Amino acid sequence: MNSENFESSINSRPEKNSDTFENADFPPWYKKIISPDRDIESLEEKDLDLIIDSAFEIVSREYPDYQQRPDQIMMSRNILKNLMNQSVYIVEAGTGIGKSFAYLIAVIAYSYLSGERVVVSTETKNLQRQILKKDLPSLENFLAPKLSYEMALGSSNYFCRLRHDEVFHEGKFRDLISESDLERYRKWTEEIIGGKNHGHMFDMEKPFPDDFWRLVGRDPDGCPGNKCLYFSSCNYYRAKSDWNSSRIIIANHHLFLYNLFNDKRTLPLYSGVVFDEAHGLISGGQSILTHKFSTDTIRDLNKRFESKLRKSLPQEAYEEWAANWSNLEMVWHVFFSSWEVQLAMNFEENNRKIISEKQNIDVRECLLSLEKICTDISDYVKEEEDSGILNVLNAILKALKKAMLFCQYYQTMNTEKLVYWGEKIDSRFYLFVCNLNLGDELSPLLTEGQVWTSATLGYWPFDKRPANKDALLKGGYFRDFINEALGETMQAEAKVDYYGSSFDYARQAVLYIPDHLAAPAWGSSGGAQELYERNLMDEVVELIRLSNGGALVLFTSNYQLNQAGKIIREKLDLEVFSQLELGADIALKKFRATPDSVLLGTNSYWQGIDVTGRQLRALIITKMMFTPPGDPILQARSKILEKKNQNPFMKISLPKSCMMLRQAFGRLIRSENDTGFVAILDSRIHQKAYGKIVLVNLPSLPMVKKINELREIILKNNLI
C-alpha cells in the first residue's frame, strides 16, 4: 500500500460505530515515540511499520521467553495495512509463527488509529478463553493500559433468571443435578443476580450437566426482551452493554455467523474482523445454513403451545387457534408424507437420499397455514404482558418463521445452488436443505476489512513442492479455500500471503508411515476388515510401547477408539484417557497432568488442542479422515463437478482430507523444544497415486516405513 492509498483510506474511514471511543489517535505505546504535535491524518505507510515494530520491541523486552520472528512482524504489518485499507487479506501462518500476537497487535493498533471496534472470531470457546485470559491481558499490560475487550458467546450460554424461576417452581430440576452441584449452582446464581459476573456457563470452573443447563440457560428464540420481569437486571443484556463499550470483541465462528444472518443485531457494530482458525468457518457456516424439519415438527410445537396457553386463552379464541393448528398439522404431514413416498423411504429405518430434481409436490398449503398462525401469534404477543407466556410464544413464532423459509426453499427447488435431501432417523422422517456455497451467503454481508488466517488454509495440488513462496501463491495454493469461502466480488479483491512454520521439523521429528499394513476394507468379504483392525491395534500398541506413553492416538471411528482403549489397557501398564468416556475437556486435562499416559480422541482432537513438552511425544493417526461418501453436500458438489468432467475426489475429498491431516500433524510440535514422532497408519499413502500429494502437503521431515528404522532415528536424534 503506497502513501497516497493509505491517506485516502484514512480520509474515507466508515462512520464511527460507537460514541464510547476516543477520536482516532495513535496507539498508547507509540505516543511515547512520536512528536506530540504529530497529526493522525499525516500518517504514511512507513508509520504503520514503525507502529508495529515498536510494539514488538516492547513485547520482546517485557515478555518472558519471547523470541522475535521476522515473519510474525511482517504478518502483523500487513494485517494492519489491510485493515486500514478495509480490504480482504488471506494469510496462512504455520505453527510457531505466533499468529495470535501478530493479528492482536495489529488489531489494537487499528482500533486506536481508526477509533473503530474489531471482532476477533475464532473456532472454539476454549480458544476464545485463551485470547481473553492470556493473550490480550499480556498485550494490555505491555502496550495499551485500560484496553477494553470482552468475550461474546451465543445467548444460550447465559443464565436466564426467568427460566430459572420456572424450572424451580415446577420442579423440573429434579433428577438432573446432584445436591452438591445444586448448592454450587445456588451460590453461582446469587453472584449473577448481584452483578458480580455475566453468568455465562464458562464463568464456572466445572460446568453443570447439559440437561440441566438447557433448562436454565437463555432461550434466544423465546426471550420476551423488555417485557421480561427481570429485563432491567438481565445478566445477558448487561454483558451486551459491556460489548458495546469494548474496542475488541472476542467471538466464535458460530456466533459471528449467527450475527450476520440475524441482520447484525447480536454483536455491536464493527469495522474490521479477524477470522482465526478460518478453515473452521466453512463447516460452521454449513451447519447454520442447513435447515432441518421432521414430519412431527408442527405437532411438537402445537403440544408446547397447548401446554402453555390452554388455560390462558378464552375458550372461543382457543378453539379458533386449535382449528388453525389442526389444519397446519394436516397439510404439513401431507407434504412430508408425499416426499417420504416419493423417495421410497416409508419402510426405511436409517437412510438418506438426495433430492436431485423438483417433484410435483405442492407446498403452498403449508405456506398459507404457517402465515396465518404466524400472523395470529404476532398480533397476540403485542398485547401479552406475561413473561412466561411470551417466552414460549416467541420461541414458537421463531420456529414457525424458520419453517416458512424452509417451505419456500422447497417451493423454488434451486438444485444448482442448494442441496435437498430426505433422511430417516430412528423411524422419524426429515427433510433438509443447505446452501452449497457459503461465500454466496457471506459476500453481501461482509463489508468490513477482513483477515482470514489459520495454520492450514491452502492446498498444493501437485506431487512436487513449489520452488518458493512466489511459486506457491501463483500456483493456486489458496484457490480451493477462496472458492469455498468468498463470493465472486470478494475473490477478485482478496490478497493472499503465506508464512511457513518456524519449527525445524527435520531435527525435531520423524514421520512413520508403515507399508506393511493393509488398507481399510469396509464392505470387503473374507474378514479383510477384521484382519485390518487387528493389525492396526497391534501397531498402535507397539508404537505406544516404543514411546512409553506420552501418546495421542487419533481415530475416525468411535468404535475403533473404544476397541483400542480396551486393548491398550490389557497389554500396557499405562493410564489411558478416552475422549468418549470422559469428555474432551476432562480427558485432555487428565492427560496433561499424568506423565507417560495415553490420550484417545476423535474429530475434535484433530485440531485446536495444545500439549507442549515431553508430555506429548508420540502422535499416532490411525487413518486419513475423508468426508463420508454419503454426505449430501459432498454428493451434490460431486455431481456438479462430474458434469464439468472434473474428478470430485481430487477436487473436494482429497483437499479436505489433507487439511485435516495437517491440522492433526500440528498437534505434536508446539514449540522449538518439542520433539517426537508422527505415525500415520494409512498405507494408502504408499499405495495410491494421490499419496505423493498428501506428503507434499505435510512439513518436510525424514520419513520411514519400518518400525526398526523409526527406533534408529528416535535413538539417534534423541526424539523421545
Image (cartoon, rainbow, N blue to C red):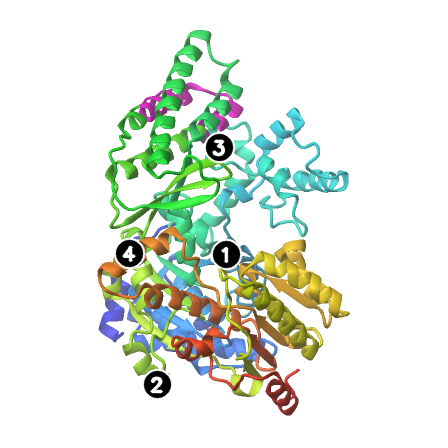
Disc 1: which residue: 149
Q: What's the distance in space between the residues labelled 3 and 4, CA to CA? A: 42 Å
Magenta extent: 369-395
Of marks 1 and 2, the one in the foreground: 2
Rendered location of residue 203, percent (x, y): 62, 49
Q: What's the distance in space between the residues labelled 3 and 2, CA to CA? A: 55 Å
Q: Local crowd at mark 4 within 10 Å, few (<14), some, or many (≥20)? A: some
**Disc ID at residue 639:** 4
Based on the displayed image, in which of its 4 quarters is residue 477 positioned?
bottom left
**Disc ID at residue 89:** none
Badge 4 or badge 2: first in the primary sequence:
2
Kindly identify the residue that appears in the image at 54 percent across and 63 percent down. Answer: 526
Q: Local crowd at mark 3 within 10 Å, few (<14), some, or many (≥20)? A: many
Report if the CB atoms under discs 1 and 3 are less than 8 Å apart.
Answer: no
Image position of 155 (left or right of 471): right
* Element assignment for label 2: loop
Of marks 3 and 2, the one in the foreground: 2
* Element assignment for label 4: helix
Disc 2: which residue: 468
Of marks 4 and 1, the one in the foreground: 4
Q: What's the distance in space between the residues labelled 4 and 1, CA to CA? A: 46 Å
Three-letter code for the amino acid on which mark 4 is drawn: Lys
- Chief secondary structure of the magenta portion: helix
Disc 3: which residue: 223
* Element assignment for label 1: strand
